[in-house]
Image (tube, rainbow, N blue to C red):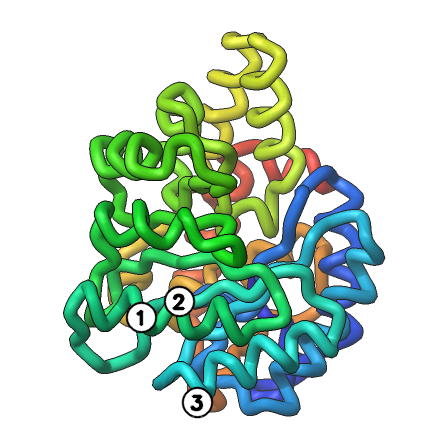
Amino acid sequence: MVTPCKEPGEVDPSAMRRLAELVSSQGCDGLFVLGSTGEMILLDESDRRAIVTAAAEGAAGAAAVMVGVGGYGVKQAIRFARFAQQDGADYAIAMAPFFQRLSQAELLGYFVELAEQSPLPIGIYHHLRMTTSVDVETFGELASHPNILLCKDTSNDLNRMRQLLAATEGQNFRVLQGIEMLILDSLNAGAHGCVSALAGIAPQWHRTLIDSFKSGNTENAQASHAQIAELTQLFQIPEIRISLAHQVHALKHSAKSLGLFERSASMLTKFQATREFEQAIENILLQSGLLTLAK
C-alpha cells in the first residue's frame, strides 16, 4: 500500500487509517504497509510507527497488517519488527539487507536470526531491486522455520514460482505472487494468493479473482484478471521509468482520483509530476473502468 502524505515529506496517518479501513472492507485479507510502494526507505522511525498504528486501527482486525521491516542489518530489522508488534501489526515482512551482497548461507543466517528474535511471524519479500537474490533452495530451508510463514515473490518468473511451490511443499508456508500479470497463472500452479500494489486501488477486483478461482468459476476469474491486466498499463507509462517516485505517484494519483484520499504528495519533498503524466494515469483509470465505477 502507498503511504498517504499531507504535504511532501509529511505522512498522513488519518488518511492511512481511512485507506486501511476501506481496503479491508472491500475484501483484502492483508494490508502490506511500508514496502517499496509505501516508500519505507524515506520514513523515519516516528513516521513508520504512526503509519503502522494507523493501518492497524483502520483494519481493526478485518485484515492482517503486514509491515516491511527491511533495513541495513539484522539489528535494525529486529527493532522494526518489535515496533511493528507494539503498534498492532500481525506480520513482519523482511527483504535481504540493503546495499550488501551476501552469500546464500549468510542470507539464510540473517533471516533465521531475525525470525528467532522477532515477536511477529516473518514473511520474506523477494524483490528484484535488492542486491542479493533469495534462491529457491534457500526458500526451501527457510520454509521449515516455525516463525517464517510466507513469501512474496516479484521475480516475474512463473517457472520460479512453480519451483518455489515445489521446494516449500508440505511446510506451513504460503507462497504469494507479487506480479499482477502472473496472479491467475500462479494460482493455477498452486500459489496461495497475491500481494499486489494495485489491490490498494482496486481491492474488489482482486477479491473477485481470488474468490472466483477458489470456487472454480474460471470465466469470472479470467474476467477479473483481464480487468487487473488493463490496470497494469499504469506501470507502462514512460515516466514510470524515471524513478520509483513516479511509480508510486501513479498509485497515489490513482487513489486521489478514485476518492480514496485527498492528496497525492510524495515523501520526496522535491518530487513534481507533470500534468501530462497525471492525465495519462487518469486515462488508464477510465479505460479500465475503475474510475467509472468509483463515480
Seen in the picture, residue 101 relative to 239 is either above or below; the reply is below
The amino acid type of the residue labelled 2 equals Val
Disc nearest the viewer among 1 and 3 = 1
- Left or right? Give the position of 45 relative to 37: right
Q: Can residue 236 be seen in this view?
A: no
In this rendering, the label closer to the viewer, 3 or 2: 2
Q: Looking at the picture, how far across and down is residue 3, in whole percent? A: 59, 71
CB within 8 Å, label 3 to label 2: no
- Front one among 42 and 160: 160
Spatial distance from mark 3 to mark 2, Cα to Cα?
39 Å
The structure residue drawn at horizontal position 58% and vertical position 18%, both measured from the top left corner, is 214
Dot 2, crowdedness within 10 Å: few (<14), some or many (≥20)?
A: some
Label 3: few (<14), some or many (≥20) within 10 Å?
Answer: few
Whichever of labels 3 and 2 marks the residue nearer the N terminus, that label is 2
Instruction: Give the secondary structure at mark 1.
Output: helix
Please give the residue where the numbered disc 1 appears in the rendered image.
109
Q: Is mark 2 on a helix, strand or loop?
A: helix
Count residues near mark 1 (Cα–Cα under 10 Å), then give few for <14, some for 14-19, many for 20+.
Answer: some
Image position, residue 246 (x, y; %): 39, 68
- Mark 3 sits on what residue? 270
Report the Cα–Cα distance between label 2 and label 1.
5 Å
Asked if disc 2 and disc 1 are in contact, CB closer than 8 Å, the reply is: yes
